[in-house]
Each structure stands twice: as structure tokens, then as C-alpha cells.
Image: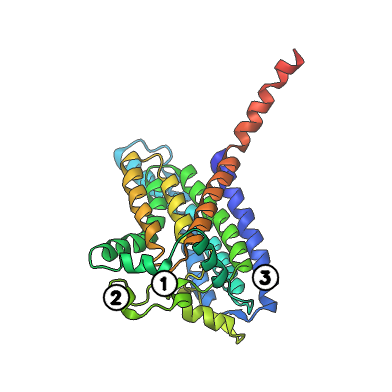
């Protein structure tokens, strides 16, 4: 029941995001480039073909008890689960990318002065922290942890597929969907450019971090905020979420998604704890961005847990009826 709930929840969220995108694009300077459609058709064709092949092979070999038949069925099941993951994840990725660009195409005042003031109230000095971490020992560790997050997403999906845990795979996709809604809404309300753009440190102040630390998104963000037409090409898109820190939210969700794999849970948890620290000097986030990102991650986990337990709670409630009649 849980797996079905996760899949339906993801479809509902994708439909919601898609509707928001369709309603917003005509009034935005963002244009969905026609160049995207050839890539979308190719990906959709691969997903459909993989699903069809898996269904045909499973149907053909369902009564085959041989060792080879068992191996082929396992490979077919893996392919089918991969198609299922892609069918849920790819539309979510497209809708979320459009939403992030539309939300960024605003001329509303940037909130970085307010975010920096929150940091100051918390007693956090971003430039001081940058100076502390900018050395040849600490910086490479933080850089590695920060950029190690991206590959963890396909790893979590493939690991759960390989271990026949489609419920956990769909749960993870549902968490990504929930966090996309929360992050998209927050970034639309609180546009920000990031700590590097706000504090403008000199090159010497972050010499041990990557040359574009915290600024990968900046050129795209400024183009979106310029008021000029912007052609969105999916393959060229960059992450645009500055507030909240989506790295932080994603790190929490990945660790939670690996809770059944004790041999990975603690190492990945430690790595992503370091990654959270790295979001400040390498990711260019304010501390309050990280706090908000953690809240998004936890809220997404809690929401998806509630979605997954809906049928169980309904069944338990139903079980009490005979007792009440007595």
C-alpha cells in the first residue's frame, strides 16, 4: 500500500507543479525552448520501451523455473523498476526545473540583507567562517563532501531497485517531490543571490575553494532577473535555489532513505554532515539558508511518512469498530 501511496502522491505533486508552470509561463520572461522536446521524446521513448520489454519478458518467462530463466526475470524486473523510477522522477525534474526558473525571473528585491541579519542575530559571521575553512586541509574535504551529494541521488534509486525495494525507491521520489514544492514556494517568496554575491570576498579569501564557489548559478539568476526573454534549455540548466539550502534538505532525505542499509547509513550520514558545513563556504549559503533547508528536509520526510502510513492507520481505525460496537 505504501508504494502505491508514494507513487500517487508524486503524480499529484507533478500535476500540481505542471499546472503552476502552465499558468505561470505565459506571464513570465522564461520560455520553454523547443529544443527540449527532442530530448523529452527520446527519454520518454526509452522509458516506454524499457517498461514494455520488462512486461513482455516477465510475461513470457513467468513459468520458467530454470536458472537462466530466473536470471533473465531478475534482469527484467530491474529494468521495469528502473522504468518506473524514471517515469516518476523525470516529469518531476522537468516541472521543478521550470518552476525554479519562473520563480527566479522576478525583479522583487533580493533578501540577502535580511538573511545576513538573521545570521548576525545567531552570532554567525560568514566571512570569518570562510577565512577559518579556507586552508589546504579543510577546504578539499569540504569540496569533496559538497560535490559528492549529486551522485547519491541515482545511487539511492539504483540501490533500492537492485534490492527489490520499490517501496523505498518511490518513497524517496515522493520526498524529492514534496521538497520541491516546499523549496519552490519559499524561493519564490524569498529571492536571494547567495553569500558570495552579497559579501563579495576577494579571490584570496576563498583561494582553496573552487573558483566558482557559490556562484555557479549567478549568471543565470541575473539573466532571469534582467527582465529580458530567457530560453530555458533543460540540459543547460543550473540549480537556482539559494534560500533554502536544497543541498541540506537533500542530504537529510538521502540519509533517511538509507535507514535500512546500516552499512551505508552511518558513513553517508557522516559525509552529508560534512556536506552541510560545506554548503556555507563552497555552496555560498548563508547559515539561515541551511537552517531553512534542514526544516524543508525534515518536513518532507514527515509528510511522506504520513502518506505512506495512511492505509495502515485507516486499517487500524477500522479494526476498532467491532470493539466499539461491543
| Residue at 48%, 54% in the rendered image | 85
**Could you tell whether 97 is left or right of 22 in the image?**
left
Q: Visible in this render: residue 217?
A: no
In which image quadrant can residue 32 be found?
Answer: bottom right
| Residue at 48%, 72% in the rendered image | 194
Viewport quadrant of the N terminus: top right
Identify the residue under disc 3.
Answer: 22
Q: Secondary structure at mark 3?
A: helix
Label 1 to label 2: alpha-carbon separation: 13 Å
Q: Considering depth in this image, is 49 or 235 the residue closer to the camera?
A: 235
Identify the residue under disc 2.
Answer: 207
**Could you tell whether 256 is left or right of 22 in the image?**
left
Determine whether 218 is above or below 99 in the image: below
Identify the residue under disc 1.
Answer: 214
Label 3 to label 2: alpha-carbon separation: 43 Å
- Sequence-wise first label, 3 or 1: 3
Q: Considering depth in this image, is 256 or 90 the residue closer to the camera?
A: 256
Determine whether 61 is above or below 191 in the image: above
Amino acid at each position: 500500500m505504501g508504494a502505491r501511496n508514494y507513487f500517487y502522491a508524486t503524480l499529484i505533486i507533478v500535476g500540481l507543479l505542471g499546472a503552476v508552470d502552465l499558468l505561470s509561463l505565459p506571464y513570465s520572461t522564461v520560455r520553454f525552448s523547443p529544443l527540449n522536446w527532442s530530448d523529452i521524446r527520446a527519454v520518454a521513448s526509452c522509458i516506454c520501451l524499457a517498461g514494455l520489454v520488462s512486461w513482455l519478458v516477465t510475461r513470457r518467462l513467468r513459468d520458467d523455473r530454470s536458472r537462466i530463466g530466473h536470471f533473465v526475470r531478475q534482469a527484467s524486473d530491474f529494468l521495469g523498476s528502473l522504468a518506473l523510477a524514471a517515469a516518476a522522477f523525470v516529469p518531476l525534474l522537468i516541472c521543478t526545473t521550470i518552476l525554479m526558473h519562473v520563480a527566479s525571473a522576478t525583479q522583487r528585491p533580493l533578501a540577502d540583507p535580511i538573511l545576513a541579519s538573521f545570521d548576525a542575530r545567531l552570532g554567525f559571521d560568514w566571512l570569518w567562517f570562510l577565512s577559518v575553512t579556507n586552508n589546504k586541509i579543510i577546504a578539499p574535504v569540504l569540496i569533496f563532501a559538497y560535490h559528492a551529494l549529486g551522485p547519491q541521488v541515482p545511487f539511492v534509486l539504483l540501490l533500492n531497485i537492485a534490492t527489490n525495494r520499490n517501496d523505498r525507491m518511490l518513497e524517496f521520489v515522493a520526498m524529492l517531490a514534496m521538497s520541491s514544492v516546499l523549496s519552490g514556494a519559499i524561493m519564490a517568496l524569498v529571492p536571494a543571490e547567495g553569500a558570495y554575491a552579497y559579501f563579495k570576498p576577494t579571490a584570496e579569501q576563498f583561494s582553496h575553494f573552487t573558483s566558482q564557489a557559490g556562484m555557479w548559478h549567478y549568471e543565470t539568476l541575473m539573466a532571469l532577473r534582467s527582465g529580458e526573454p530567457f530560453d530555458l534549455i533543460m540540459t543547460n540548466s543550473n540549480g537556482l535555489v539559494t534560500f533554502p539550502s536544497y543541498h541540506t534538505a537533500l542530504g537529510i532525505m538521502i540519509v533517511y532513505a538509507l535507514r535500512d542499509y546500516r552499512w551505508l547509513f552511518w558513513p553517508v550520514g557522516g559525509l552529508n554532515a560534512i556536506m552541510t558545513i560545506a554548503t556555507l563556504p563552497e555552496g555560498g549559503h548563508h547559515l539561515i539558508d541551511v537552517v531553512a533547508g534542514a526544516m524543508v528536509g525534515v518536513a518532507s520526510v514527515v509528510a511522506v511518512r504520513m502518506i505512506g502510513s495512511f492505509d495502515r492507520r485507516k486499517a487500524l481505525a477500522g479494526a476498532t469498530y467491532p470493539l466499539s460496537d461491543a
